[in-house]
Every structure is written in structure tokens, then in C-alpha cells.
Image (tube, rainbow, N blue to C red):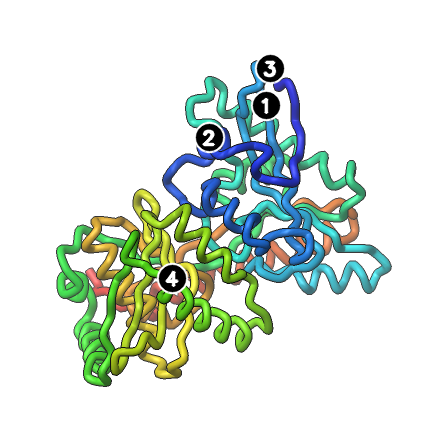
Amino acid sequence: MPAEIRTVTDIHEIGEADWDKCAGTANPFVSFAFLSAMEDSGSANADTGWQPFHLVVTDDDDTVAGIVPLYVKSHSYGEYVFDWSWAEAYERAGGRYYPKLQAAVPFSPVPGPRLLIRSDHPAPERVRTLLIGALCALPERLGIASLHVTFCSGDESRAMEDAGFLPRTGIQYHWYNRGYDSFDDFLGALNSRKRKNLRKERKQVRDAGYSFEVLSGDDLKAAHWDRFYAFYHDTSDRKWGQAYLTREFFDLLHERVRDRTVLVAAFRDGDMVAGALNLIGTETLYGRNWGTVDRTPLLHFETCYYQAIDIAIERGLKTVEAGAQGEHKIQRGYEPVLTHSAHLIVDAGLRNAVARFLDQERHHIAQDREFIVAEHSPFKQE
């Protein structure tokens, strides 16, 4: 039995050593370094609608056994699993949807663990049961209508479904390294038409005068971050109406995660005109943010997708996860995979309506995925 189950409003109350013993090293987005940069930079706090409220399970010897990165949300921005229609319906019926609880990585549609369990714990299943039980108890205890766990693993989603959560699926597009020695080796796995198209796209970008640098560690300078932040801010303002991340976040990211950070910088006539920020896990390259002052469409494909494949092959990584949405990725060798989330709805009427919606949505998503693979896969048919 645990000595304590509690919530904390500052990640530093848990501390880096205990947090990372639970988070592990595979996925940098759940690391203390990344999430503390979110909090310390003012990107994720009460003012931005992401008040930290991390759940902690402690053993009777004061050892931190498990953690859930949890936030009190006053809106649904920056989540990438959309529940706006649920909120509208509930509030139209007289309910109060916000604030809600969100177990997630702020502003990051990156699949990964959300039930973080100490790697050397003798009873990890017991800790997971305690974490899920504590999540189930929180909404009613706090008078909150719902709790959402987004981009969790499939195993976590199934375990939470057994505890009463509603499961939800989505689609992302990931690239898989099947032992390729080079980009040309990867192209050899594609059918002739798609192979020619990818080569043509890459050539057009080079012929237009673009060059690229892959920057990481101490090669990344303040000037690169200044330029990239301007790109990020411009892109965010145009697409979402606001930039979620502060400039200080990128300084803290460089300070704390520099060895796992890769910035693909695009240059034209000596000027940096675009950039794609990636983080590296033990097996995966994660596309994080992109921005540009150049509106050439092919520049996006090269900077975000093809350069990422080059990096993954060079470093022997197994996967590239290039962010949310984007059916155009499948034409470029990225394959549709299911993502998972779990949703705890307190009000019975809203829960029943959401459950019906999710049943239909899962059916359509499964059909869409099958169709995409059958009709649009660029790979050679065996």
C-alpha cells in the first residue's frame, strides 16, 4: 500500500531524479527536462490554461513509485485530440465543462507513456492500478466534469477502459526504418511512380537554391533559436491564432535537452529561412515544431519529412514521428498508425452521448486506415 497519493502544482516538488526514474529515457517529452522547461518558461501555467497538477504515488519508504503528468485546463487548446463539440453540448445543456483535467504533454501530439512507473519497482502493475484509481477519483472529488488522458499507449488505454474510461483512437503518420542504409535504399522500397516523385521533389528544392544544416548540441547558437522562434511565432499566429511557447522555452530546451535536440535549418542566399525542431528518443526521431518565412510548399516536405528520414537512417533510429494529421505524409513513405486516448466523463448523460460518438468514430477511423493503406500506400506490392 502506498504511503501517499497526492497532487503537486510544481514539477520541482517531485524533483528530476525521482521524475526520471519513473519517466525513463525512451521518450524525451515525458522527461523532467522537457516538462520543467514548459513550466519554468511560463509556457504551461495557470495563465496559459495549463496549470500543473501532477499526480504522485509514494511508497511507504517515501520512494516515488509512479507519476502522471497532469494539468488543470481552462480550455481545449494545444491538445490535438479535439473535444470542443463535447464542451459545447454540455454547456448548452447547462453543465460546466471547464475546468477539466488533462494528462498530457502540453502542446505536443506525441504518443508515449502517461502512467509513469518507477522502472525498478517490484510491483509495477500495482502502481499502475493505484494511478488509474487515483485518476478515477479526482474529477468527482474536485467537482470537475471530466478527465482526459491523451496520446497514451494502447496498453494504458485498455487498462483505463477496464476502469471506466472511454477509449478513443486517432491516426498519425509514422515512418519506419526497415534497415535502410541510405535514402536511396528507402526509395528502392517504393513503387516506381512514387520513387520518381520523391526524387523530383528533393531535386526541385535543391535547384531552387536551398541548402540544409542539421544542428544539435553546441552547434546550436542563440542566433539559430532567435531565427527559429520568429518562424515558429509566425506559423503559430497564422494557423492557431497564438504562439503557445515562449522564447525562454527554447533557451531552457537548449540548456536541458541539447543533446537530444536536432534543428534542421534551411538556408537560401545565406539566410536561414526555415527550420524544423526535432527531439531524439532511444529509437525515434520526434518532429516537434516547424516554421518558415518562405511559402514554398516543397520546402516543408524537405525540411520536416525527408531530412528527418535522412537523420533517422544516419543515426540508426527505428521510427520518425512527424506530428499530428497530414494525409499527404503517406505519399512520402509515412504510414498510418493508430493513436490512443482515454476519457473519463462524470455526467451520465454526457458520457452516454460521448460513448456513442466514439463508437462511430472508431469504426470510421479503422475504415479510413484500411482504405489509406490499400489505395494510397507508396510501397511496392509484394
On the rendered image, what quadrant is the N terminus found in? top right
Q: x and y percent of residue 256 in the render?
A: 41, 46
Residue at mark 4: 222
The secondary element bearing badge 4 is classed as: helix
The image shows residue 210, relative to residue 158, as above or below, that is: below
Query: Count of labels shown?
Result: 4
Label 4 Cα crowd, 10 Å radius (few <14 / some 14-19 / many 20+): few
Residue at mark 1: 58
Left or right for 91, reference 191? right
- What residue type is disc 2 on? Ala
- What residue type is disc 4 on? Ala
**Nearer the observer, 97 or 259:** 259
The secondary element bearing badge 3 is classed as: loop
Label 2 Cα crowd, 10 Å radius (few <14 / some 14-19 / many 20+): few
The secondary element bearing badge 2 is classed as: helix
Rounded to the nearest angstrom, the CA distance separating label 3 from label 4 is: 45 Å
Q: Residue at position x 41%, y 80% from top?
A: 293
Left or right for 328, reference 171? left
Residues tagged 1 and 2 counted as in contact (Cβ below 8 A): no
Q: Which of marks 1 and 4 is in front?
A: 4
Looking at marks 3 and 2 on the same chain, the residue that comes earlier in the sequence is marked by 2
Residues tagged 1 and 4 counted as in contact (Cβ below 8 A): no
Q: x and y percent of residue 337 in the render?
A: 40, 55
Rounded to the nearest angstrom, the CA distance separating label 1 from label 2 is: 14 Å
Residue at mark 2: 17
Q: Nearer the viewer, mark 1 or mark 2?
A: 2
Residue at mark 3: 60
Q: Residue at position x 42%, y 59% from top?
A: 288
**Nearer the observer, 307 or 135:** 307
Q: Residue at position x 86%, y 59% from top?
A: 94
